[in-house]
Image (tube, rainbow, N blue to C red):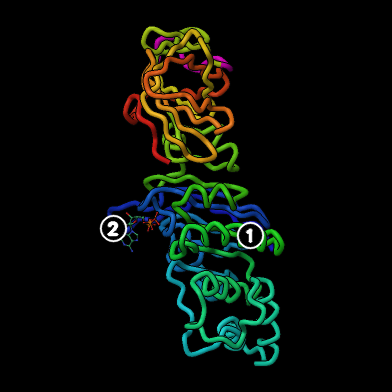
Amino acid sequence: MAGLHLEAISKTFGTQTAVERMDLSFGDGELTALLGPSGCGKTTLLRMIAGLETPSTGRIMLGDTDVTAQPAHKRKFGMVFQNFALFPHLNVRENVGYALTIAGVSKSEAGTRADRLLDLVQLTGFADRRIGQLSGGQRQRVAIARALAQEPDIFLLDEPMSALDAKLREEMQVELRLLQQRLGITTIVVTHDQREAMTMADQIVVMSKGRLEQVAPPDQIYNAPANSFVAEFIGKANFLRGTVRDAGVVIGDSYLPISPPPRFINGSPVQVVCRPEQITLTDAGPLMGEVVFVRDLGASREIHLTTPIGTLVAELAATMAPTTLKKGDRVGVHLPVAALHLFPDGAAPDQTAMAAE
Ligand code: ATP
């Protein structure tokens, strides 16, 4: 197996650029999630990798081999797409072994290999069933086993869980990740679901409008977002507007120190971003806030506050949030300096908007 490298890959459809000149590497045996809002170019990028779309510019390298001009069927890439179609007239074993028999493998050998793959995706005992006798999650596993039958070099999945309900989707994410790790297969998953990307990926590629916004492991994407788009797209965030002064930022009449000190010159307008769970509440503090809304989320409690620097949302573990906290209470609000991210103030979201998860 080998890693995959994209060199200056782009795709235009007429006058529209779906993917803008990208350099990207997918590490050997790693799982990468392509994440971004609808229309950002995820599927186009995956289709180019699969050989189903011809790049307008650039090269696709599998290890040292240039596969850019190779048609899809010549690339040993396994694929599971959004609306994966299984053959209803074949049983589960035949569906999984189908590509092998087409490739000239004997029926009995294909059957044996299919049974081994069915064990792998936890469908032992289902081999003789018809597709119509399976649940959505079981069909999904058949599609995965089928894609893996030819021992692909690269495994490509486009929104593979989108047809499953929320609980099953979460189970399948863990299952797929464990399977991928066991096989050590270089895998690329397209998703618009940030939880799915965070759950499964070694590397997340955040895209918007055909461009790369950030390429990094999940914890870095969450804790050190490269820009306000990433901060807003991944997880929840409080957005404030301020002006850089010395080793901190002025927001309204308040001054917040920043660590490490801002990279911007004095007077620069900036967006200040802070994750709700990094805010703590105290009895008193230099920054006071008034509780305007408390939302009980079971494991945590979301507290909406008005403060002199703007509206803030804090999320405290249920065990840490006083159960007596209610609308109208005044509390100290502590924003840890290390938890504040500063970005140049460009096309910003609303001044104090809480980005939806
Ligand atoms: P979604 O999450 O909705 O599937 P996506 O991020 O996968 O979106 P793409 O399907 O790659 O996005 O589309 C990127 C852009 O390219 C979109 O604006 C889309 O309309 C355009 N596009 C994709 N395929 C074609 C095509 N065959 N012809 C013209 N435009 C296309």
* x then y, percent, for residue 213: 46, 40
Determine the secondary structure under disc 1.
Answer: strand
Q: Is residue 269 visible?
A: no
In the picture provided, is 248 more to the left or to the right than 175? left
Q: Residue at x 55, y 24 (%)?
A: 339
For label 2, count other residues whose C-alpha is less than 10 Å away and answer few (under 14), some (14-19) or many (20+): few
Location of mark 1 (residue): 186
Q: Earlier in the sequence, mark 1 or mark 2?
A: 2
Residue toward you, 272 or 322 = 322
* x then y, percent, for residue 259: 57, 16
Say if 338 sits above or below 79 in the image: above
The three-letter amino acid code for the residue at tag 2 is: Gly
Residue 352 appears in which quarter of the rendering?
A: top left
Determine the secondary structure under disc 2.
Answer: loop
Question: Could you tell me what secondary structure mostly forms the magenta stretch?
Answer: loop
In the picture provided, is 271 more to the left or to the right than 25? left
* x then y, percent, for residue 319: 59, 31
Say if 57 sits above or below 212 in the image: below
Q: Identify the residue at the far bottom of this view.
A: 107
Residue toward you, 191 or 278 = 278
Give the numbered dot on residue 148: none
Question: Mark 2: is the Cβ under 8 angstroms from ligand 1?
Answer: yes
Name the image quarter holding the C terminus: top left
Location of mark 2 (residue): 14
Say if 92 sits above or below 223 in the image: below
Residue 184 appears in which quarter of the rendering?
A: bottom right
Q: Residue at x 55, y 83 (%)?
A: 95
Closer to the eye: label 1 or 2: 1
Which portion, as a residue range, is magenta? 259-268
Residue 182 appears in which quarter of the rendering?
A: bottom right
Disc 1/disc 2 C-alpha distance (Å) = 32 Å
